[in-house]
Amino acid sequence: MIKTYYTTAELLAFGLEGLPRSRQGIEVLVAREKWPSIEVKGTRGRGGIRREYAPPALIMAAIKDQVVIRALTQSAPASAAAVIPSGSPLPPASAASTAMTVATQAGALKDWQKRTAEARAAILREVDRIAQIVGREKAIMKVVIMAQDGTLPEHLAQLVPVANARAGRDGKRTLSRRTIYDWFKAYQPAAAGVNAVDALAPKDQHAVVRIPAWATDLMVEYQRPQKPSLAWAVEQVAAKHGLDKDALYHRARRLLGKMGNVELQAGRMGPRDLKNIKPFVRRDSGMLWPADVYTADGHTFDAEIAHPAHGKPFRPEVTTVLDVATRRAVGWSVDLAESGLAVLDALRHACEIGGIPSAFYVDNGSGYKNALMSQPGIGMSSRLGFTMTHSIAYNSQARGVIERAHQTLWVRAAKELPTYIGATMDAQAKQKVHKLTRRDVVLAGRSKYLMPFNDFIAFCNDKIATYNNRPHRSLPMVFDPTLGRRRHMSPNEAWEHGVKEGAQLVTVTKAEARELFRPQREAKVLRGEIRLFNNLYFAQELTEYHGDVVRVAYDIHDGDQVWVYDQQGRFICTAGFEANKRAYFSESFLERAARKRADGRARRLEAKLQEVRLEQQGAPMHDVQDATFALKNNASPVLELGDLSVRREEAIEVFAHSPAEASSTSNARPIFMIDSDRYEWLMQHRDAWTESDRQFLAGFVGSDIYEALRERFEALGLAWDGAEGEVFKVAV
């Protein structure tokens, strides 16, 4: 500390030039020059009183320099962060200090900016500490002079070039009075969220993006959904602005490098794809009990199996119901295509196994957003008492639980089958299996590579059991004594734990489920009769309900009877099938749906056949389009299979029910427009076969087209009977 009066011992300790080197010598000097003195009470001195002297101005200046040097030398912080902790404000330079806008926000600094800011903070802290002794102006000048003379303590001298952010060309750049004052002014006490160190950070001149005139045109060309290359976009811009494309390419790369990754992909990716690279909300299911929330979704299986009706390859639709809290697969079903009935069956299974949920979280697909599930009074949500919630359209991320389960359950299971057709399947192997399965079905009616439908049901059941017993990484950890370490719970373990902790499950028996899960529709009673799906049902108990609208429950597999309820849900009676004008026998809901699907297929195939006929006749394109449009407008919506291979077979099947093309009966070989015409002519003129014809026949009899037209060939007596062994030898 700087004092006004010092004892002779304190003056001797400074070791200043111009002062004697002994205490007696200092006492003689003080007496001779008559320094002002005072008496101070203390433990030392004669009679408990010591005398202190006021040095002259020159000696006092030397003392101040000595104190400053000692203060700088004794302070050796390990880092600037130790001098000024993050968030600690520096003392303001003076009352006249003006606030400056902080250019760099906290958390957005590069490493070199942080190092520079910390070095500046350390130097300012030392200056401010010395200013407590000699004042700010003298403290700044002392540090500046010592920096220029090279007499700063080593730990501060090392901070000078870092604080300057540039050492100068000669490497001798030091400090200046104005520089230190500018650093003091850079601190803005009112800057919320910006601490002292961040406020002292220099600006990054390279981070300042200067938008050139051609940048807008470049982004227009580059941010296209076709995802063009940067080189192509640069070529378009260079030609427009008259610039050298090679030089412009490098400038464009630097410009794009300064843009955000999401901003750069805008236009190249649509809003739905951009969601995959934007931040998302991770939902916490830790507060849920078992059966609080079920989520469900359908998945088209990624491998082909044998169709239960005709044995041809197709991809079934698997619907899975998951409990969100425990990730347990509580219900599932397999159907030919996604539909409300498949969802109904999966929900029934889930309610029998795990109980009725409080909420059912699904997407906006037709299998979930329909009267069967949500219509007031007769929909499943009303009858079972759960709340159905739909996710935002095209926002599968919101249902990540069920989407991930598809990968874990069904994609992994599909890879076990030889008919897997996913993206990771080898293209050559996929093509080979595709041909083998079609050929086997044509020749033998079945293929060993296609799993039978009943076996597939058992296969799915095994996969569900394996999934529910396998540890799930989103579930809590438990100690496994068998493994001797901690692991995640399995869905079954999490479910059992939740039940033990007090989860209230609303379970239903199979008998109750049969009644609860019968679909219902509203119908009007007329003279004791109810019309449902063009079938008439009659019961004497309905006499007094003439003209009333009632609820009719039906069994999707049995059309012989229906169950009638009033609008309050009270059971009235069971109505039996009587008669209608369309059929003498009852038609179940599934049979009616299958017939409608077949009728729709026939209409669509007739439209394609008409288009082919018009093309063969050389009709103008607009006539073809008009005819096709007219045929398509006559078709009604039907249930469809979402399988490309089956649709291809449907497109081929039209030839089996269409009139035969007029084929030449003469021995002269005609020009064949389609392969089926060539096959019919060859079967009628066997003596005209050539080696090329035999190769054609070997391939044709094993094709999908032949299988689709088999009934036609049998009716014409032209079916292939395998007698021509030579053809099969060629095929092999």
Image (cartoon, rainbow, N blue to C red):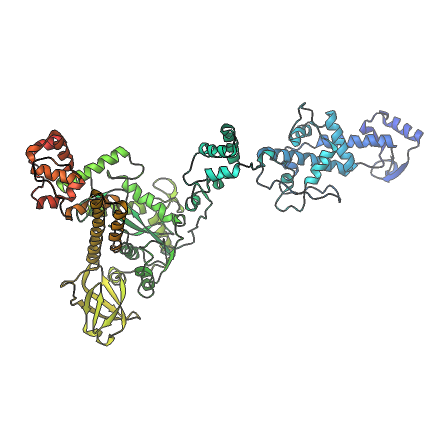
**Residue 191 at x, y percent in the picture:** 64, 45
In the picture shown, does residue 590 fall above or below 419?
below
In the picture shown, does residue 53 fall above or below 568?
above
Q: Nearer the viewer, residue 617 or 322?
A: 617
Q: How many marks?
A: 0
* Residue 31 occupies quadrant: top right
Q: Nearer the viewer, residue 248 or 547?
A: 248
**Residue 688 at x, y percent in the picture:** 8, 33
Q: Residue furthest top?
A: 170
Does residue 427 appear in this view?
Answer: yes
Instruction: Please state if 208 lies on the left or on the right of 180 as rendered.
Output: left
Q: Nearer the viewer, residue 624 or 377?
A: 624
In the picture shown, does residue 428 fall above or below 391?
above
* Residue 351 occupies quadrant: bottom left
Q: Residue furthest bottom?
A: 544
**Residue 458 at x, y percent in the picture:** 22, 47
Q: Nearer the viewer, residue 523 or 163?
A: 523
Q: Quadrant of the N terminus?
A: top right
**Residue 534 at x, y percent in the picture:** 20, 64
Does residue 306 appear in this view?
Answer: no
Residue located 91% across and 33% down the image: 35
Q: Quadrant of the C terminus?
A: top left
